Image (spheres, coloured by chain):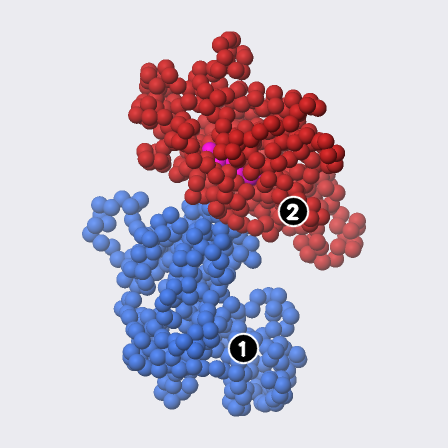
Chain colours: A blue, B red
Amino acid sequence: MSNFFPLKVIELENTTKDSVVVSFDVSQDLYETFDYKPGQYLTLRFNVKGEEVRRSYSLCSSPMLEEPLRIGVKRVKDGLVSNHINDQLKVGDTVNVMPPDGRFFVDIAKENYKTYYLFAAGSGITPILSILKSVLYTEEHSFVHMLFGNRNEESIMFKEELKKLQKAYPDRLLLKHTLSRPKSEWSDLWTSKKEKRHRKGRVDAACVKWFINEFPPYAQNAEYYICGPGTMIENTKKALQENDVPDNRIFTESFGTATTDDGSKGFDNARLVASLDGEIVKATIPEGKTLLRTLIEAGKEPPYSCEGGVCATCICKLKKGKVHMKNNLALDDKEVSQGYILSCQSVPLTPEVEIAYE
Amino acid sequence: MNMDKQQNWMHELPVAAYTSKEWFDMEMKHIFSKTWQFAGLVEDVPNPGDFISVQAGLNNIFIVKGRDHRLRAFHNMCRHRGTQLLRAVGKGKKAITCPYHDWTYDLEGKLISLPKQEEEFPELKKPLHECGLNLHEASVDIFKGMLFVHPDKDAPSIMDFFGSVVPYLGPHIVEELVEFQEKEGEPFYAKEINANWKIIVENYIDHYHLAHLHEGTLNMYDHAKAEFGWEGSHYWFYEPLVPDYLADVKNAAPYPLIDSVPMEKIGAYVPWLFPNIGITEGESTWSTFHAIPLTPDRTLVVIRTKVMNLSEWEFTKQYTKSAMSKVWQHYGNRGKYEGDASDPMASGDFMAEDVYACEQQQKSLQSPMFSVGAQAQRGEFAVAQFQRVVKEWIEKGKAHE
């Protein structure tokens, strides 16, 4: 089920003060296993302070280029794993890694003629960078219009790499930065507003509207990719919808600690019946535990990776009872109405819950 | 098709292909309704809510811009009883309502309302946009500053169709140019010509005639140095200016030079994009040449011309410089025959010369004695190749029927 492979760290590079890019070596026999589409992520397993933890990180490398698998990891305040990676990881270390996965990706094809709108904020740049490089490198007729939000100049991940791409593809890449708290410089005093390299503010409704009005698509098959923390995704998506962008052209990947939990506690000591790998598992769900954690503690191996309600690896179907999902950033309304749930986010609302992993 | 073995022939096609309703209908079905069709210039649909509708072969298609500035294309007929939804050009649409029974669609083509739904259509129980009554989608895209539509919503990408000819097009950045209109809203040239659309295409791509029919009108271009060929279904052509004109082009050009064309690339780029749109990319003008078949022996030609986006004063200055240039004493405006300017062959106007030649050829197709006698192997190579491409599309279409 959970197939982890030991991969060796071959390079560590700080792209900002509080983030590191980790490169992994993939031996020839694992090339196919670790093949990926731009936008997908890796799941890493660590033992930190005696606890097994998994975290998913988007690949920022491009499968179209001859470059190692690369993830960008930004420190999260009090984050167990992100700080471990930033502080402890050394070149030569081996990390247990699951093959690439994820539903947020672009199908690159040489003959495509598209306009890609990429919206990134903070470390949300990682999958976006992979998409950006892959499109520019492979789809010679396609255009990229990208809006990248950060706190200030110093917190922009991959700043140099982005500059190089702008130079290499001036006709097909349009990149605008927006900074929520730019550091003022003396030179700003005699720089006219027009000449400023960035816009001030967050990636919010006004900014998104400005961006799509200012930079209309040339190739008319336009797609919109959004990745960032917390409410940035919802705000961007809503702004796009309000400007007539149809849902089937919008793709999102949520990051970090966003939680929409309303504090529902759930039903204590509910009975769980789960059909998993052809086995019927019965267990009692301890107070506050998710369906997924209940199964893991019962010694079972249900599929999962991010445990944050983002990746949908732990998807299963609810056959009986009701659950509350603390955070759902992966399933759309249609899937939910068909009874699909994220087991890593679900707590029971009824005395009995029956689920099936398909 | 006329199966008579005695039938007369053009190079690769029977004469009937230029005169019969049967061939015309086949072309409408298998060529004009299955290819990307020219629909205008990007500036024709400038703002969200603006739309245009165009006839593309058998299909009437409208293009509308959303607030996301992306264009959408739909077949211009109500899903109720087929009434045309939108007329030629318009602005500010937020929804599309059929004039007949007020069925209303949003800008994604989804049916959103209809009068007396519960009483008259009790069978429509699902949300309206799930009732299979949304507008039929079409495709729209932009290529070199031009709008194109395709009746199939899953049409192959426009770059699949035109991509291979791109390297042979002029370096002109069309979006920077503005349309030259003597009267606002009217194209530079529009005329119904009494000839089959293919006669007009063949004239456009015929290198052999340039030095002869147009000996006094297009002689500022160096026909001897012309380069041309085919890529996919499309024809490309380039020829430089004659040395005298090139030496004084900054003064002699009738309009300000197009600044996206570097001096070393200056010349006439004159491709023909299959099936019916030519581009004439010159030193001071950039034009589309749209041949719209009306009947087997009538074709509407619409030419739209773009020039540099400069003040009227700049154009006046250039006009004066051009008028004073010695170049035009030897080139560009002398008719083939002596005579009154109303005679196309004495007019000194190359379009009038072409129209004359096309209409005269079409007339002769009626003659039982007519047949193409011989083919210039280089100069008319493109004419025969174009006919082969037409034949291929027809045969491919019929095979899939």
Residue B168 horizontal/vertical position (percent): 43, 40
Which residue shows up at 35% across the image and 19% down it?
Answer: B327
Q: Seen in the image, is B296 located left or right of residue B227? A: right
Q: Seen in the image, is A246 located left or right of residue B248? A: right
**Of helix, strand and loop, which one carries label 1?**
loop
Q: Which one is nearer the viewer's eye here, B365 or A115?
A: B365
Kindly tell me whether residue B60 is visible in this rendering: no
Which residue shows up at 42% across the image and 22% down it?
Answer: B219
**Of helix, strand and loop, which one carries label 2?**
helix
Tell which residue pokes out farthest to the top in this image.
B339
Badge 1 crowding class, 10 Å Cα cut-off, few under 14, some 14 to 19, many 20 or more, is many
Q: Which mark is residue A314?
A: 1
Q: Which one is nearer the viewer's eye here, A117 or A96?
A: A96
**Most frequent secondary structure within the magenta stretch:** loop
Tell which residue pokes out farthest to the left in this image.
A186
Q: Which mark is residue B396?
A: 2
| Image: B300 above or below B323 | below
Write down the chain letter for disc 1: A
Whether the magenta-drawn stretch holds residue B78 is answered as no
Residue B191 horizontal/vertical position (percent): 58, 23
Write down the chain letter for disc 2: B
Rounded to the nearest angstrom, the CA distance separating label 2 from label 1 is: 49 Å
Pointer 2 and pointer 1 on the same chain:
no
The region drawn magenta spans B270-275
Badge 2 crowding class, 10 Å Cα cut-off, few under 14, some 14 to 19, many 20 or more, is few
Q: Which mark is residue A256?
A: none
Q: Which one is nearer the viewer's eye here, B74 or B248?
A: B248
Residue B304 horizontal/vertical position (percent): 50, 29
| Image: B44 above or below B67 | above
| Image: B382 above or below A207 | above
